Image: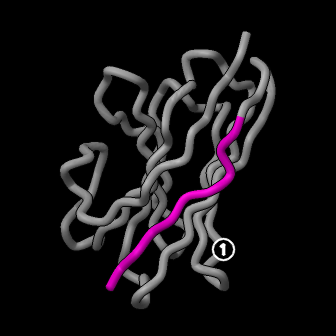
Amino acid sequence: QVQVAESGGGLVQAGGSLRLSCTASGRTFNDWAIAWFPQAPGKERTFVAQIRWGGNGIHYANSVKGRFAISIDTAVNTVYLQMNSLKPEDTAVYYCAADVIGGYPGTNPYDYDYWGQGTQVTVST
């Protein structure tokens, strides 16, 4: 059974940094993609970054280019989201999502079948 779990959220001042982790388990993931979707209160989940399990195929939303960096350590089945220069508008619950590359998962959250419980990121002014 595939499971993904996020960690690393917290409270940070504007301009600060956080690193989120997403650990996947339950099978081998060589043909999978992992993405991050923050969800602010009262809003839908929005795509910010995706990476394929081999470390290629990296994509970012325009809103985070130059500030966020996604990476992977396949030895520990973990994807990281390094978030720098954080802004109050980055405040959200950050969800990690996973699905097989063959299904062409992209920027739409409905492309992904496996989700973690989310981790709260709060950026204060």
Measured from the top left, where is residue 78 in percent x and y?
60, 71
* Residue at (36% x, 34% y) in the render: 46
**Residue linked to disc 1:** 73
> Is residue 22 toward the left or the right of residue 39 in the image?
right
Task: Looking at this view, name the residue that lies furthest to the top.
Answer: 125
**Front residue of this view, candidates 51 and 114:** 114
Quick check: 55 above or below 16? below
**What residue is shown at x 40% (from left), y 33% (from top)?**
39
Quarter of the C terminus within the rendering: top right
Whether residue 4 is in magenta: the answer is: yes
Q: Quadrant of residue 45?
A: top left
Badge 1 marks a residue whose secondary structure is strand
Residue 62: where, in percent of width, then height? 47, 27
Relative to 50, is 30 above or below? below
Q: Residue type at mark 1: give it.
A: Asp
Point out the stretch of residues depicted in magenta: 1-10
Residue nearest the viewer, comparing 124 with 38:
124
The x, y position of residue 9, in whole percent, is: 65, 44
Identify the residue at horizontal 50%, vertical 24% (top origin): 63
Tell me the residue at 62%/16% (across/down): 88
Classify residue 54 as left or right of residue 115: right
Quadrant holding the N terminus: bottom left
Q: Position of residue 104 (x, y in %)?
A: 23, 62
Main secondary structure along the magenta-highlighted residues: strand
Q: Is residue 115 magenta?
A: no
